Image (cartoon, rainbow, N blue to C red):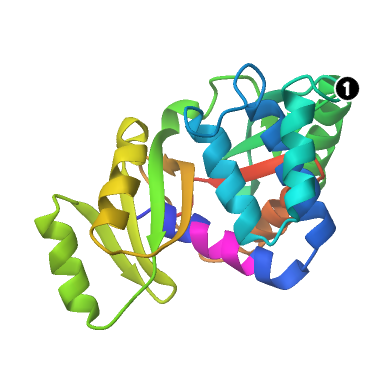
Amino acid sequence: MSGHSHWATIKRKKGTNDQKRGQVFSKLAKAMSLAAKGNADPETNFKLRLLMDKARQANMPKENISRAIQKGSGQAGDGELEEVVYEGYGPEGVAIIVEVVTDNRNRTTAEIKNIFEKSGGSLASPGAVAFLFRQRGWLLLAKAGNSEEQMLKLIDLGVQDVDETPEGIEVLTTPAFLVQTKKDLEAAGFQLKQIELIYQPVTPIKLDDPQKIVNLFEALQDHDDVQKVFTSLG
């Protein structure tokens, strides 16, 4: 199951190393505010419910979560937020997709462009690299007991794209079936550690020295507006 594991590993490493709790809360708050626009009910707004689950996993205070949702639903004032997806190339032609939430597209575009160029990459036009990826639903399950039995149980449930990693059991599905897959797995007794919508490279590539890409990845992740970063590395 190449493509998503590399992204997940870098993401987990980054989250473990920087410990920037305030920045994590700020990013989650912006994402929840945007998701709550037009529908602040997590029961019918899966994207909002997904973000609320992530916020709880990050130990974000309940009042911060409520404030973010109120802001998005128009109950609290502030700047208008929008989601922007940037595409670009890193060193050695590695394709990169960056998801951001911003209240100033022009400022963010200039700053993201600068990060790419400082790391030997370049910002590309919309559609330039998107075709190199496909969007997938990604779930990380906790290991419990006999991992081989867990894997067989997943196969019996009809899960076809599954991989065991040191961090847990990773499952891939189509975005349309992510909600139902989550419900089925939890009903079957699996503990969900993480759930995301990701961009998986169609044809993952390998580099002898991926450090330059890791440096660019981390620089992008450090930007306050950036929510997720995906690369074509396998």
Question: Which residue is outermost to the left?
Answer: 156
Say whether residue 10 is magenta. Answer: yes
Q: Is residue 219 visible?
A: no
Q: Which residues are magenta?
A: 8-13
Report x, y in % for residue 177: 30, 35
Q: Residue at x 78, y 23 (%)?
A: 81
From the image, give the main secondary structure of the stretch colored magenta: helix
Look at the image and tell me in which quarter the N terminus lies. Answer: bottom left
227, 51: nearer the viewer: 51
Residue type highlighted by circle 1: Gly
Residue 2 is a magenta residue: no
Q: Position of residue 191 (x, y in %)?
A: 37, 65
- Position of residue 9 relative to residue 135, above or below, is below
Viewer-closest of 109 and 95: 109
User: Residue 200 location, x and y as percent?
Assistant: 42, 43
Q: Is residue 190 left or right of residue 114?
A: left
Query: Could you tell me if residue 55 is visible in this image?
Result: yes
Relative placement, left or right, of 163 versus 233 is left
Q: Quadrant of residue 140?
A: bottom left
Q: Is residue 5 above or below residue 52?
A: below
